[in-house]
Image (tube, rainbow, N blue to C red):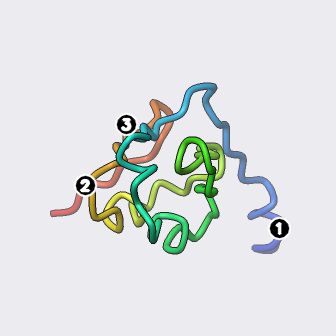
């Protein structure tokens, strides 16, 4: 089987609870919202009431938004079925 067909066999099961917690009181005051700009999966969307809406099922777990937030308003609790790597 060629590579393209094998890649089509990959499956990703998304849990029913978000692994991303947002401190909305901080998020509402953020003007630039860098989390929206840096996320390659478009997980974050601007929301006038809450500051941002999180579509956790899109998340690639790269952590870009977590580190881009200057106020520490995001917290990740990685999903149970996630993959972790240990180097060294």
CA–CA distance between discs 3 and 2?
A: 17 Å
Seen in the image, is 65 located left or right of residue 46?
left
Which sits in the foreground, 34 or 6? 34
Helix, strand or loop at label 3? It is loop
Which numbered disc, 1 or 3, marks the residue closer to the eye?
3
Q: Which residue is mark 3?
A: 77
Which numbered disc, 3 or 2, marks the residue closer to the eye?
3
Seen in the image, is 61 located left or right of residue 59?
left
Q: Are marks 3 and 2 in contact (CB under 8 Å)?
A: no
In the rendered image, residue 8, in percent from the top left (x then y), is placed at: 81, 60
CA–CA distance between discs 1 and 3?
A: 37 Å
CA–CA distance between discs 2 and 1?
A: 30 Å
Q: Which residue is mark 1?
A: 1
In the rendered image, residue 62, in percent from the top left (x then y), is placed at: 44, 61
Q: Are marks 2 and 1 in contact (CB under 8 Å)?
A: no
Helix, strand or loop at label 1? It is loop
Which sits in the foreground, 68 or 77? 68
Q: Closer to the N terminus: mark 3 or mark 2?
A: 3
Identify the residue shown where x is 53% and y is 67%: 39
């Amino acid at each position: 089987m060629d590579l393209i067909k094998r890649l089509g066999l990959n499956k990703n099961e998304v849990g029913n609870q978000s692994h991303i917690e947002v401190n909305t009181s901080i998020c509402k005051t953020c003007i630039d919202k860098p989390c929206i700009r840096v996320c390659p999966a478009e997980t974050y969307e601007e929301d006038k009431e809450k500051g941002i809406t999180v579509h956790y099922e899109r998340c690639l777990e790269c952590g870009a938004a977590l580190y881009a937030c200057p106020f520490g308003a995001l917290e990740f609790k990685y999903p149970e079925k996630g993959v972790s790597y240990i180097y060294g």
